[in-house]
Amino acid sequence: MNYEIDIAGKKRSLKLFSVSEDTQIAAFILYGDVEMTGHAAEKLLEAAPDFDIILTAASKSIALAYEMTRRAGKEEYVVALKSRKVYMDNPITVNVNTITTQQQQSLFIGEDDAAKLRGRRVLIVDDVISTGASLRALEELAERAGGIITGKMAVLAEGDAYDRTDITALGKLPLFDGDGNIKE
């Protein structure tokens, strides 16, 4: 079963996947969708507050962060990784549980990336904000690195996340019951 969505003028058909017995989500996969990545970057930048650098989490929103950075004429962006790499000196680590991973994972930024955030206006960018767990983890990483969060953006906000006043999203992604009907 699929859900048809219009994201700021671009249509996509999203396949539904179960995350529990009574809940399904429509999977918005940005990987490989060059047209949507560019479109979303353009539309998000139109609504973005002033920022110096973008922070995102690996991995589905990396291309979006890159494209937004490039279009905004910025020099760099930071990606919080899901495992510690050998090149990460003194990493900052935050644990997170997300709806799609369904288990605890960690996000890491190394000392060098933390220095890129320190004292700078940070725009947090993600593909989809659902429960807000990844967003909270990114906020904590930015704050612990000394960054100043100026905004939080996503292509889509899922369920109640769309009603949050502290994020900007291009569209609402509903949650679905076990039969594929939109939950109200």
Image (cartoon, helix red, strand yellow):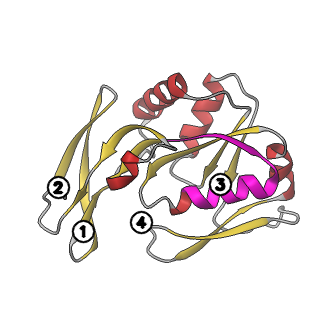
Secondary structure category for the residue under label 2: loop
**Residue that label 1 marks:** 23
Vertically, is 126 above or below 80?
Answer: above
Secondary structure category for the residue under label 4: loop
- The three-letter amino acid code for the residue at tag 1 is Thr
Residue at position x 61%, y 23% in the image? 71
Callout 3 crowding tier (Cα within 10 Å): few <14, some 14–19, many ≥20: many
Residue at position x 37%, y 46% in the image? 162
Task: Judge whether residue 171 is colored magenta.
Answer: no
Gap in Å between the C-alphas at discs 1 and 2? 10 Å
Gap in Å between the C-alphas at discs 4 and 1? 12 Å
Among all residues in the image, which is located at the extreme front? 165
**Residue that label 3 marks:** 139
Q: Which mark is residue 182?
A: 2
Secondary structure category for the residue under label 1: strand
Q: Which mark is residue 100?
A: 4
Vertically, is 98 above or below 128?
Answer: below
* x, y percent for residue 53: 72, 36
Which quadrant of the figure contains the C terminus?
Answer: bottom left
Q: Which residues are magenta?
A: 135-153
- The three-letter amino acid code for the residue at tag 3 is Glu
Callout 1 crowding tier (Cα within 10 Å): few <14, some 14–19, many ≥20: some
Gap in Å between the C-alphas at discs 4 and 2? 18 Å
Q: Quadrant of residue 92?
A: bottom right
Task: Judge whether residue 136 is colored magenta.
Answer: yes
